[in-house]
Amino acid sequence: MNVHRIAHDGESPEGVNSTYVLPDRGVVVDPGPPGERTWRTLRNGLDVPLDAIEHVLLTHWHVDHAGLAIHLAEATGASVHCHEADAPLVGEYAREREQRLARDERAMERWGVPPGRIETVIEGDEPSPLPPTYPVRAHGHGEAIADVELLHTPGHTLGHAAFRAGSALFVGDAVLGTYTPNVGGSDTRVEHPLGTYRTTLKRLRGYDGTTYPGHGGQLDHTERIAAILTHHDRRSVAVRSALDDRESATPWDVATALFGELRGVHVKMGAGEAAAHLEALASRGRIQQVGSAPLRYGP
Ligand SMILES: [Zn+2]
Ligand SMILES: [Zn+2]
């Protein structure tokens, strides 16, 4: 399988965004973050003529992956493809953004985040330069686009997908080389986010081949999946011990105990991650839920 990687520069804790071109299939995976500069990087990095691109595949709705999708589709005449659960967030951008902000606000209230912090997160959410609506093709697990198989890999987002082409596996943000992908805060639609994500990782472990993540270059996914699973096991222990000296705590209490002062979007990511761990611990009977508005857990 001929795979060409385009690395976008720019600062992200997850590492630089990676776009992949499969010239033999006319496919581009995750065109990258929106903006003139990233568009130039993409254009200069494409080693095929624009009209050779027929399909734009998105691993998930996050703007650092999907931001250039429509721009690329319009420039090439290509169609845009996504798992059916994430497709509306790209294809019905305006409507879904409103709903997402309302949903995130409710989630943060449930997690016990103070109102002032919630307001900062919601106001800090910059609208992406995507058209209000655009035809995005929605797919289910196992479907193929230009002989590239879509694998549903939920957790980081509800409709997160990996793509398999020959021996190449494009995993988006499900497995990253130097960073543990957020669960819980990165898509507030996911129920049981930690358990869902763990199942995805264990399933991905069963595939071999060359793995291309959504940030950074090629990685050994077996090794990284083991490291990410261990990381979450340790974090669960830390979340459990944060409850030791308290009668009860909200996800926000636990997030600040674990991560210290949280700012900007990290308020949502940190509280969401704590909430994901608390929910998983409670479902295993390791802690108890003692309140619901906001959520409270006790040892
Ligand atoms: Zn992401
Ligand atoms: Zn990402």
Image (cartoon, grey):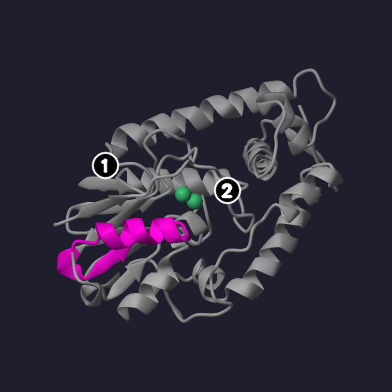
Quadrant occupied by the N terminus = bottom left
Residue 267 is one of the magenta-drawn residues: no
User: Residue 45 in the image: x percent, y percent?
Assistant: 26, 57
Residue 218: mark in rendering: 1
Residue labelled with disc 2: 193
Residue type at numbered disc 2: Pro
Task: Identify the residue at horizontal 61%, vertical 46% (top origin).
Answer: 184
Quadrant occupied by the C terminus = top right
Task: Identify the residue at horizontal 67%, vertical 30% (top origin).
Answer: 286
Q: Is residue 237 above or below residue 15?
A: above
Residue type at numbered disc 1: Gln
Name the quadrant containing residue 291.
top right
Task: Answer with left or right where residue 278 lies relative to residue 172.
Answer: right
Task: Identify the residue at horizontal 52%, vertical 70% (top origin).
Answer: 90
Residue furthest to the top in view is: 245
User: Residue 94 in the image: x percent, y percent?
Assistant: 63, 73
Q: Which residues are magenta?
A: 23-47
Residue 43 is one of the magenta-drawn residues: yes
Task: Answer with left or right where residue 131 lies relative to residue 96.
Answer: left
Whether residue 21 appears in this view of the structure is: yes
Task: Answer with left or right where residue 171 lies relative to residue 97.
Answer: left
Which label sits in the foreground, 2 or 1?
1
Task: Identify the residue at horizontal 49%, vertical 41% (top origin).
Answer: 12
Task: Answer with left or right where residue 103 lies relative to residue 234.
Answer: right
Whether residue 208 appears in this view of the structure is: no
